[in-house]
Image (cartoon, rainbow, N blue to C red):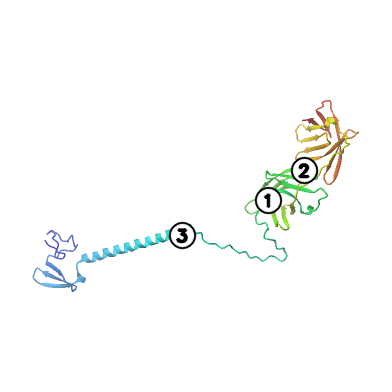
Amino acid sequence: MICPRCGKEIDDSETLCPFCLQEIDKNVEFNDFRKDGFVQIQAKDGVEKIEPISEAPKYFKIAELNIFVIAVVYILLISLFTIFAFRFIQKTTVSVVTPYIPKPTVVSTPDETEPVTSANEVKSYSIKDLYGSWCFESDKDKTDIPINYYTFDKSGIVLQNYGSVAVKGKFRDISDDEEHRVYLNIQSGFNGAYLFVYSGNKKDGFVLELIDEKANSVYRLVKAKAKSWNVKAPKKNKIDKTLVGKWLTEDKKKGYVFTSSGSFKRTTGNMTTRGAWSVNDKNKITVKYIKEALTERDIPYQKTKDKKIIIINNVEYRKS
């Protein structure tokens, strides 16, 4: 059997052409698709009829739909490819070329009651800026008398030097993200947590402010070269040679060192005192050292049968 629509040979039992997918009209013998837009159909009964192409076989509509779908998919693929290509080019450009970011210009109007600082003003600081020696701002011009010096070491030791007396203390950084704080523990001075501010400029000098918030006190210190004072023994100096050496208490928390040249060192806890020593006729040791001024003290001592033990100011010391 010949399909009257597409002219293909098909099985006689077919009701739907497998080639053009159109229903088989048993009354039609052939089609003649004319160039003028009509189809001429020859019926079996010999009657001819002419139909417009708009009523052409259904397989034309399906083909057109397939072409439309393919075109849409093609356009989508082209669009996706274009988008990804553009993003890739953009990303590559950004990673290679560093964008120009202009530096911000800071414009500020200073308070007329405050001095305008120089460009060298401290803008950021840390616990490391405490390292070195400091004295109170009010004492910075006093060079002829003993004053307090505080020396911060990177190991966490702070040494208070006052004349020929030195006290060893400790400090540690307890700053947080918002404020700078330091914990100070010095036997004869600072003890507790202090807010610290490091300010000033190179021209006028840097200032360290230790702020005791509980006592509402502010201590202003400036950088200085620590100076220690000492007392030298006179050339004609009376000493007891049996005292020369190092003497310690049983718990080793206190001690004396007497030298044959007439110098001495006394340690009590974290405090060290240096100066000159001698003995007098009253069985006393005379020590001289400097604190606020030259200080002289008589300390009673007693010898014992054991040459390695002496009693100084009612405290037993053993020779080390």
Mark pair 1, 2: CA separation: 22 Å
Please give left or right for residue 85 compared with residue 183 in the image.
Answer: left
Looking at the rendered image, the quarter that the C terminus falls into is: top right
Give the structural element (helix, strand or loop) at label 1: helix
Considering every residue shown, the one lying at the far bottom of the view is 36
Image location (x, y in percent) of residue 40? 14, 71
**Disc 3: which residue:** 93
For image coordinates 84% across by 29% down, the residue present is: 242
Most distant residue in the front direction: 235
Q: For the N terminus, which image quadrant? A: bottom left
Q: Amino acid at mark 3?
A: Thr
| Residue tagged 1 | 129
Of discs 1 and 3, which sits in the foreground? 3
Identify the residue shown where x is 81% and y is 29%.
Answer: 309
Badge 2 crowding class, 10 Å Cα cut-off, few under 14, some 14 to 19, many 20 or more, is many
Total residue callouts: 3
Pinpoint residue 133: horizontal percent, then vertical percent.
73, 48
Residue 176, percent from left and from top: 63, 51
- Mark in front: 3 vs 2: 3
Q: At label 1, which amino acid type do we have?
A: Asp
Q: CA distance from mark 3 to mark 2?
A: 65 Å
Looking at marks 3 and 2 on the same chain, the residue that comes earlier in the sequence is marked by 3
User: Which label's residue is closer to the chain start, 1 or 3?
Assistant: 3
Q: Is residue 280 above or below residue 227?
A: above
List the residue tagged with mark 2.
166
Q: Quadrant of residue 295?
A: top right
Mark 1: give few (<14), some (14-19) or many (20+) Cα within 10 Å. few
Relative image position of residue 270 (x, y in whole percent): 75, 40
The amino acid type of the residue labelled 2 equals Ala
